[in-house]
Amino acid sequence: MQKLQLWERYKERLYYNPELGMAVDTSRIDFSAGFLSEMEPRIQKAHADMAKLEAGAIANPDEKRMVGHYWLRAPELAPDASISEEITATIASVKAFAASVHAGNIAAPDGGHFTNLLIIGIGGSALGPQFVADSLGGAKDRMRLYFFDNTDPDGMDRVISELGKNLQRTLVMVISKSGETKETRNGMLETRQAFAKAGLNFAAHAVAVTGIGSELDRTASQEKWLASFPMWDWVGGRTSVTSAVGLLPAALQGIDIDQLLEGARACDRSTRARATRDNPAALLALSWFHATRGKGERDMVILPYKDRLILFSRYLQQLIMESLGKERDLAGNVVLQGLSVYGNKGATDQHAYVQQLREGVANFFVTFIEVLKDREGPSLAVEPGATSGDYLSGFFQGTRTALYEKGRESITITVDEVSPLTVGALIALYERAVGLYASLINVNAYHQPGVEAGKKAAGTVLKLQSEIIELLRAQRGREFSSEECAMALARPEEVETVFSILRHLAANPDHGVSRIMGERIFENRFRCE
């Protein structure tokens, strides 16, 4: 398509919201002039489905739950007055707690101000807070944030080592709705031990964000933790960033959470519009549908041209892939749906995988995120008439053009600046787009049976490990091959898993298992001394 034709299509399709300083450009998605009309019945059904969800319908039939993350920034829309009151009270409690910490009224046992915040969570309980912290943080932060977002011992050791003597000035936030998430429990136990080794009382540093009455809630109450904030069953982890999960760490960091919520609220208003051209989330969802033929046939590459947005693709991976990656549709048909997401940032990616994007396999579409404001204040002219920010803008425009010349489609989202308002808007924009797209492809965006299956499988492995350790200890000194061990446990079909478990046990001193090398790796033998 010629540049003047693209300009005309740009003017025709551009969505702009002056309240948010946000624009959505779908002109480089090559749907026909009649595509939106053809999709109108389906997108209107999606809007109707979304309206029911916001009104309190049971949108997650597997768990008999409502889905109400939109109420978090508009409590008045909640279907029950008690829910509205709980949301409002929680936001007030978050602000009051953060203010007390900043003032030193809530302080470390020795009276010193808390200067660090260690957040223990996984999935949405870490990805959302991490994205907000990294996008909006800086040298003026009231507290410095650290994360345990895995059950990797070495990763936790690195964080504890970095905290060092500042552990006594560290507030710990433990996030788990059920209170039974194993990765989060492990992180809490490791942190508790680190505090004990330092002669510190963990409970005097701890805050919980959890379901009321959960195991974690009971622990926090019994041990007299500093505070406990609610997680409601109608908020999923991947959409929890505008709950206490994301608001409490943001407020402690010193971020304006009122502006974050306002950005999400204003974007929610715009994405309720029934007219497609006036609804940025509908434009995104329909563009995704066209680019992937409604079957996830192409990946979504997220390319923000701003260092502060580098974690956005990681955040969107969970939001989009956990929501849309489903084996069956709502009618029970096998559909194998999904939408793969990856990305880093521009212009870095121009020196990485843009080569393949332009000239390799065309199995993707790109979403560029452009930020107009370069920095606070003026910039250095790195050459006559051009700053570093000018180069960044030029690289963005050049890459978009170079890709489109090769038939690679793209969407561009432009924001005036990275601020609490725009970050809140970006979060809300994608939450709504995911919900609308899920309706277009007829899947349940609000459950995650595959995640639960993985947890159950992990539990089976750990049970088998316990049986292996018991066998080796009962016959100390005897050497077992993996096959002999599997046979002794009457689990011959699990021999590969037995081998993997034995290798891991022998690589670590915790269980007293040693390895005797064989000629080939699978002939290794194992024993307890």
Image (cartoon, rainbow, N blue to C red):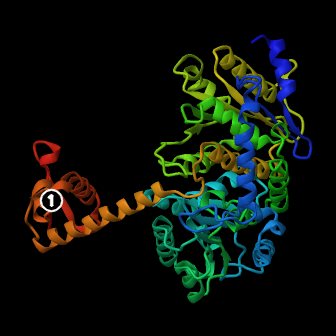
Q: Nearer the viewer, residue 434 or 43?
A: 43
Regarding residue 150, the answer to whether it shows in the image is yes
Taking depth in this image into account, of 273 and 396 the one nearest to the observer is: 273
From the top left corner, tell me how far across and down residue 46 is, in percent: 71, 47
Image spot of residue 101 (x, y percent): 75, 74
Query: Relative to residue 205, is residue 341 depicted above or below?
Result: above
Residue at 60%, 35% in the rendered image: 300
Image quadrant in which the C terminus is located:
bottom left
Determine the residue located farthest toward the left in the rendered image: 478
Whole-percent x and y of residue 183? 47, 64
The number of numbered badges drawn on the structure is: 1
Q: Quadrant of residue 505?
A: bottom left
Kind of residue indicated by mark 1: Ala
The picture places residue 248, in percent across and down from the top left corner, at 72, 67
Name the residue located 77 percent from the left edge and 25 percent from the top edge: 27
Circle 1 residue: 486
Quadrant of the frame with the N terminus: top right
| Location of residue 128 (image quadrant) | bottom right
Instruction: Check the image and name the residue furthest to the top.
Output: 2
